[in-house]
Amino acid sequence: MDALMLSRVQFGVSVGLHYLFPITTLGLAFFILIFESLYLVKRREEHRAVSVFLAKLLGMVFTMGVATGLMLPFSFGANWARFSVFAGSVFGPLISIEASSAFALEASFMAILIFGRNKVSPLVCWFSALCVFLGAHLSAFLIVAANSWLQTPSGFVVENGRAVMTSLTEVVLNHSTLIRFFHVVTAAWLSGACVVAGIAAYYAARDRHQGFARILLRFAVPIALTTAILQPILGHMHILNVLEHNPEKDAAYEGIFHSTNGATLYAFGIPDENNRVIHFGIGLPYALSFLESGNPLSRVAGLDEYPRETWPPVNVIFTTFHLMVMLGVLMIVVFAVGAYLLWRRQLFRSRWYLLLLPWLVPLPYLANELGWVGAEIGRQPWLIYKVLRTADASTNLLPAWQIAASLIGIGTFYLLLLALALYFLGRQIAKGPAAE
């Protein structure tokens, strides 16, 4: 691989492994706020015990997220110097605001939840949980806004070969920020619900901490089902946004090589970019036209309407997109069954279902990663859509062997951190809550 591809792989590995921790942070912070609110109102110790337990897990996840996130700014300077020079005055302030405000807010009040709980009142604990929740979600909003600016850039002009911000509001609230933020946050809440449900089911199936497990499952299963159902709704809104602002990506997502009336919505297929066809395609005729316009006979623009050099890698993003959708459907089905069992008061007697839930935990993380792979690779060949090509954004003087060496080092470091995170989280889960 050449230096450009190695730089892309290195940044992809770094971001991909780091992303596991922020989405877990968002999900756990959501549940902690729920149980702190319940404890503030009802003063039931079991609600407090849940919050204490989840706060310990959150502290570990947050620490690992910080450790993995520290590597990312160095990648911009080392591997993407021309991007940093061109867009630093626009992209940099969002990252700085995130670190100096949202991150600081989250970290400060998390310390109270973990270390100072017994020294403050329940109201202060609840306020701390609220600040952790707001800090985590503000951080996510700013990071999503920065990434969305790469997808739909606005609020800047190019002067002397550099992007100069003209409106912070337009940069932050660019054309794709809000829908992408809601889609990401809902996915994070679904991930948190899967983690919480998996832990509770692990205890319930082994007849441990039964009261604790019942409380968690009664909240986690309905929340997981609700967020799983919201995902395709928000995802469809996101796709309409992509269709408007990045039509090449939308055509590649859907596997539409040739413009057609009454386009098929594929559920499965093997894309063949060279021959411009979907092999073994299974889908609903006319459904894509209907979803995109409300008219089942409307025309859907294909990739053949755009220059070949502006096509994203169709094989990759068609596959990642459809795998993500299939995982989403699977989670809806599983949690719909769980909600039915909960409604019929059979959930805690259905051992097969309790044994299934822990195996479901990786699915939302895999779906999240697939979604981001599709979003980022789907923007190619642009780093900043129709403003700066990826090939023109890398550090062009860095030898390929040095990038390969750093990729091996960073990859090893990240895998070690991931192994440590799983080990310590596993120990804490095996230990269980401190009190029933």
Image (cartoon, rainbow, N blue to C red):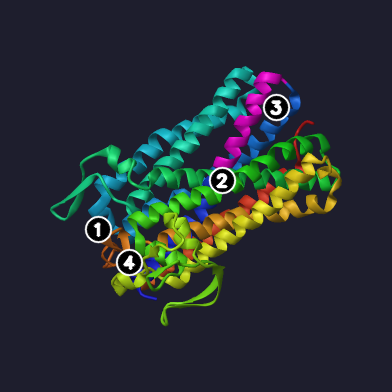
Q: Amino acid at mark 3?
A: Arg
Mark 1 / mark 4, whichever is N-terminal: 4
Q: How many marks?
A: 4
Mark 3 / mark 1, whichever is N-terminal: 3
Q: Could you tell me which residue is drawn at 47 percent across and 69 percent down?
A: 316
Disc 3: CA contacts within 10 A as few (<14), some (14-19) or many (>=20): many
Check if mark 4's residue and mark 2's residue have beta carbons within 8 Å. Answer: no
Disc 4: CA contacts within 10 A as few (<14), some (14-19) or many (>=20): some
Left or right, 174 with reference to 411: left
Q: Position of residue 257 (x, y in %)?
A: 40, 73
Q: Amino acid at mark 2?
A: Leu
Q: Secondary structure at mark 3?
A: helix
Residue position marked by numbered label 2 in the rendering: 230
Residue position marked by numbered label 1 in the rendering: 387
Q: Which residues are magenta?
A: 24-43
Residue position marked by numbered label 4 in the rendering: 381
> Which label number is shown at residue 48?
3
Report which quarter residue 60 is drawn in.
Answer: top right
Location of residue 299 with respect to 190 vertically, above or below: below
Mark 1 / mark 2, whichever is N-terminal: 2
Q: Secondary structure at mark 2?
A: helix
Q: Position of residue 332 (x, y in %)?
A: 65, 52
Q: Amino acid at mark 4?
A: Pro
Answer whether residue 405 is magenta in the image: no
Q: Could you tell me which residue is drawn at 68 percent across and 23 percent down?
A: 39
Q: Secondary structure at mark 4?
A: loop
Q: Nearer the viewer, residue 142 or 229?
A: 229
Q: CA distance from mark 3 to mark 1?
A: 51 Å
